[in-house]
Amino acid sequence: MKGKTAKVVLVVLIASVIGLFFIFDFDRYLTLDYLNARQQDFRQFYAARRVRTLGAYFAIYVVVTALSLPGAAIMTLAGGALFGFWPALVVVSFASTIGATLAFLVSRFLLRDWVQARFGERLRAMNAGVEKEGIFYLFTLRLVPIFPFFVINLAMGLTPLRTLAFYWVSQLGMLPATAVYVNAGTALGDVQSLSEILSPALLVSFALLGIFPLAARKIVDFVTARRAFSGYTKPKKFDFNVVVIGAGSAGLVASYIAAAVKAKVALVEQHKMGGDCLNTGCVPSKALIRSARLLSYFRRAGEFGVGNMQIEFDFAEVMARVQRVIAKVEPHDSVARYTSLGVEVVQGSARIASPWTVEVNGRTLTTRAIIVATGAVPFVPPIKGLDEIDFLTSDNLWRLRELPKRLVVLGGGPIGCEMAQAFARFGSHVTQVEMGPRLMSREDEDVSAFIRRRFESEGVRVLTGHAATEVRVQDAGKVLICENGGSLVEVAFDSILVAVGRKANTHGFGLRELGVRLEAGGTVETDPFLRTNFPNILCAGDVAGPYQFTHTAALQAWYASVNALFGQLKKFRVDYSVIPWCTFTDPEVARVGLSEDEARDKNIDFEVARFELAELDRAITEGEDHGWIKVLTAPGKDKILGVAIVGAHAGDLLAEFVLAMKHGIGLNKILGTIHAYPTLAEANKMVAGVWKKQHVPLKLLSWVERYHTWRRR
């Protein structure tokens, strides 16, 4: 029988059995009421025909489990009540495992392709776990069922886990839970009167049902920790509750929180307090963009009825202002401030010597927990000849005091786009080179196209689909060689800014030597609680991923610090459900939630409401009547799935939608909220109005029209 035909036959067979199960109401036999009513009959039948009863029970249990039918838990309780503890435990253990394995094989044969295509994103965590440590991962899921067992059966069938491994791990992993349920059934079977409901045996059985998942989780955590810490000697006492390595956004917030809850915390920084955000990232780039934007407004003076203006500026003074802005913000992140908060700040290079010790400047710090917040550094691609010139990155860009006449910006992401536009406004001849088909690849195509047109109107030469292959130094100057569709393109330049992304900073402080696992992309591998494979070593910020934003670093820092200090009592899963971001080009591009492209890739149905800022009064008065707000909603509902804003102050406008998505507020509530006139924020209400017009109740309006007609008579 060919594969496709076999699948069809199997589907028909399974559907028929399931259909008969519900058509003839067989599920009524798998209820506590029915089993209690027939308990004496079952016991008499079992006493007369033990082997036959056990065989029938075994077969029915296998079918119920294999087809993921409801009733397995009730059958387990019934088995304990009818057969007693040991016979029921043996039968249920083998029947449930065989049924689970059959469901696993059916899933593998029948559902793998379809489910992976439709739900691949949701299965990513499970697939990743199986690839890394399949047997232990499955055992953990069996012992601490985060998902129902039937879901695990089907999902594991979609993974490369071997059938034999699935069987024996399931047999072993489900045994403790099976024993608890069988024991509860045994106790229930002994109840003969109301007074026996409060018997110690029954109360203990129900208590076991409640505490088993918690106890199993604690056992798994204990075993995991023992595996990780084997070979290391734990100190008898500790100098600190937590040591934080790195004083960037994540490290500062983690230290602040730890100190606020009266923990003893040390913060180790080898360079400058504030990290990339203060010294080479967010703060200096936004200061530079502000100066560039001011120049653009001067050049647009005629639009506002102001005569032509003569513009003179000193690029060196612009860059000096950037440093003054950094200096003005520095006290917020200074050693003095954090010392006053109760943090012991240690200047120097840290090295993690063991899971509980950090060495700095010849001093050994012992600590209960370590938070790694070492950030990221600019990624420099292996382009031939690039290392032979003094290229720029976001780290050393701020040392410039002379404006490059011809600047190549390598990269079409946020940093590349922001700097390309800013330097073009200062007067550089900018060529932006992007290997992909468009700028801002994380955004929808309409956003990319709009930004490209805007850049080109300001004099930026945009080369998408161009892969940089070589840098040559010639008599006439420096040249970047790019490959485009099989042809070579030469781009002359004086300076080149490499802005193709950032890589996690994981070298030089003992992570690799200790055996802390890394992801394929170079970030540190963490669990949902931001713990590494050493449970007391946690990560936050760019070094952890998956988002490299200052605000997500702060978000992760809260979870990392709380889990480091209180994880033995209560752990918190990091919440990435609503993550906003903004690219500070002019106009700004801001987004939260799904884009159209992402929704299609994930097979999520959606509707689009779009409002053009050209129709907003305040945008018109400001001369910023370009861009739009686009909201994705669930079909027929006002639930917000994602928002993209292109326009002036897009990052500020996005905040209302972030709040709405975080707290489940729909577009109807935004539409019903008063927004001051005339403000840019009115655009949020306007797009909600667009959605409302798209969902006008036409039938109701027709009746309202008839009512008004009747009233005029």
Image: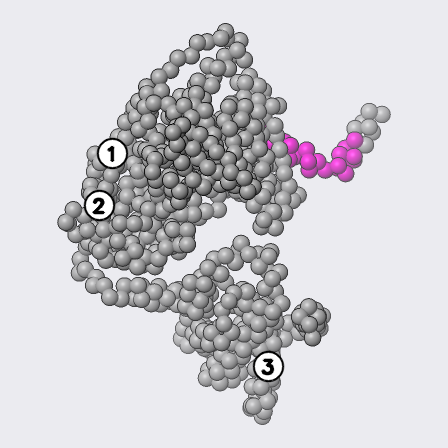
Q: Is residue 120 magenta?
A: no
Indicate which disc, 3 or 2, sits on the residue closer to the N terminus.
3
- Rendered position, 456 above or below 436: above
Name the residue tied to disc 3.
Answer: 59
- Rendered position, 578 above or below 127: above
- The crowding category of the residue bearing disc 3, from other C-alpha atoms within 10 Å (few below 14, some 14 to 19, many at least 20), is some
Tell me if residue 562 can be seen. no
| Secondary structure at numbered mark 1 | loop
Q: Amino acid at mark 2?
A: Ser
Instruction: In the rendered structure, find residue 334 and report the number of the disc placed on it.
Output: 1
Marks 2 and 1, how far apart in space? 18 Å
- The crowding category of the residue bearing disc 1, from other C-alpha atoms within 10 Å (few below 14, some 14 to 19, many at least 20), is some
Mark 2 against mark 1, which lies toward the viewer? Answer: 2
- Rendered position, 448 above or below 349: above
Say how the picture is coloured: one colour
Name the residue tied to disc 2.
Answer: 349
Q: What segment carries the magenta color?
A: 682-705
